[in-house]
Image (cartoon, grey):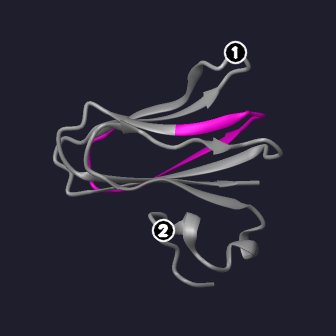
Amino acid sequence: MPDFDPATYGQIAGLSQFQGSGFTFFSAAAANGISPQFQAYGYEDFTYFITASGVTTGATVKIQAQTPDQTWVDIDSRVVGGNGSQIVKDAGVYAAIRATISSRTDGTFAVTVIAR
């Protein structure tokens, strides 16, 4: 299997070997923001990859799900205060999911998901 690069996973060829769907929320975010949403219908298992580089104090990264009344609720919220990768696993039935970056002071952030 080739080396795994979570920053580009949503776009790589060979996705079928993971038997899921990949989506990139942010590839190299250097500012606060809200990602495009991933339509999550039909998926129940989610693995999120958060990768940070150039971080001294970092940012808060949230994974959110949309409720039936169209509001967004946090699935996971974490302060990313150093370089490296983190993995968040989640199971649920959601209409849509997204990522947000807030309180950013430095660094760049990649956030991707594999849904099955």
Residue range in magenta is: 79-98
Please determine whether, in this image, residue 31 is positioned above or below residue 22: above
Element type at mark 1: loop
Residue 81 placement (x, y as % from top left): 26, 42
Q: Quadrant of the C terminus?
A: bottom right
Total numbered circles: 2
Residue 114 placement (x, y as % from top left): 64, 56
Residue 94, quarter of picture: top right
Q: Which residue is the site of mark 2?
A: 8
Q: Is residue 43 left or right of residue 106?
A: right
Q: From mark 2 to mark 1, how far is it between C-alphas?
A: 32 Å
The dot on residue 69 is: 1
Residue 8 placement (x, y as % from top left): 48, 68
Q: Is residue 89 left or right of residue 86?
A: right
Amino acid type assigned to the residue bearing label 1 in the image: Asp
Please determine whether, in this image, residue 58 is positioned above or below residue 47: above
Mark 2 or 1 closer to N-term? 2
Residue 78 placement (x, y as % from top left): 41, 34
In the picture as drawn, the residue positioned furthest to the bottom comes out as 1
Q: Which of 96 and 52 is in front in this view?
A: 96
Q: Magenta segment, principal secondary structure? A: strand
Q: Is residue 57 left or right of residue 45?
A: left
Please determine whether, in this image, residue 102 is positioned above or below residue 13: above
Q: Quadrant of the N terminus?
A: bottom right
